[in-house]
Amino acid sequence: MKIIESTDAAQAHVRERRAKSVLVPTMGALHRGHLELLRVAREHAGKDGEVAVSIFVNPLQFEPGSDFKKYPRPESTDAKFCEDAGVNLLFRPREMYFDDRSVYVEETRLSAGLCGASRPGHFRGVCTVVAKLFNLLAPNAAVFGEKDYQQLAIIRRMVRDLNFPIEVIGVPTVREADGLALSSRNQYLNTDGRAAAPVLYQAMLRVKELAANGENSVTRLIDAARGVIESAKDARIDYISIVDRENLQPLERLRPNAFIALAVFIGKTRLIDNLRLT
Ligand code: AMP
């Protein structure tokens, strides 16, 4: 596995490269969810292609007061994880931004609701860093998790609207046996928090069950989800929304292509999840 730590070296590598390349952008603290993205990346790259992983804890996407400083950075464990997973290129830049940077990439429609409403500037940071990674590493395809569904939709829109010649591949969410979606942030949870955290999935399943039994009032469905979440210790709802999968607009009545997305604080840890309903 080749490790590259500067943007200049990344561009030199791309100039020499012949093989098809598939990129998996991450912030590190790699887990089984990321491993699934790597598996899909290999499937698309072929055995002679390049699977590239980037690890960069992007300061631009952390709003003030969030967990940028304490975000886990297990550098050597992550490098071994990539090596063992058959990654060909690990890009972990020490620096990505100029001090006097003045250009950003901003998606203006899909970013308005859900996490975009609770985390101002977050998706501008995400789009800016992903656009830079796309330019630096010039992959043929890039793989993202459906766990961050809004992020995936926004990246697809960015690629479409700015004509990046890159295929965007979405991968279904990988969960623990009790339903909790794998996340690097799960390691912030203490024992009580970990025991309470599957409530996000339970609430979504309850809504799916009610929907399957004919309930189509979004207000009533969201009330049901709220009831499940509020039964858990130390859980505080940031948002629960039922939206259209394509344009992420809130729905009043269930219709085809609806999904539920939520963000819940368990103690101080903010967890997100989503599930297709129809
Ligand atoms: P992160 O390192 O948390 O920024 O995530 C990097 C990529 O991995 C993103 O595309 C995430 O959506 C994806 N990802 C994170 N957790 C999971 C999971 N449990 N299942 C599937 N994909 C995931």
Image (cartoon, grey):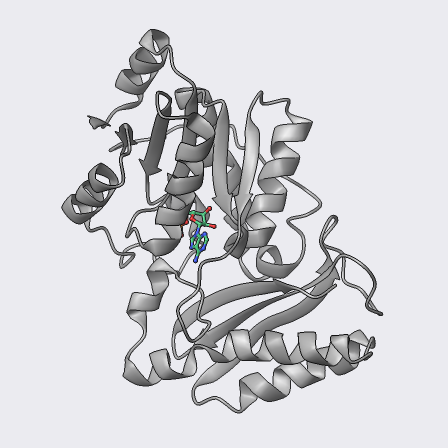
In the image, farthest residue toward the top? 16
Q: Residue 111: give x, y in percent of width and height.
A: 64, 49
Of 194 and 256, the residue lying toward us: 256
Of 252 and 94, the residue lying toward us: 252
- Would you identify the image quadrant in which residue 75 lies? top left
Residue ID at (38%, 22%): 49
Residue ID at (21%, 28%): 1
In the image, farthest residue toward the left? 76
Image: 158 above or below 259: above
Q: Is residue 171 visible?
A: yes
- Would you identify the image quadrant in which residue 160 lies? top right
Q: Is residue 270 left or right of residue 106?
A: left
Image: 45 above or below 74: above
In the image, farthest residue toward the front? 47
- Would you identify the image quadrant in which residue 47 lies? top left
Of 202 and 234, the residue lying toward us: 202
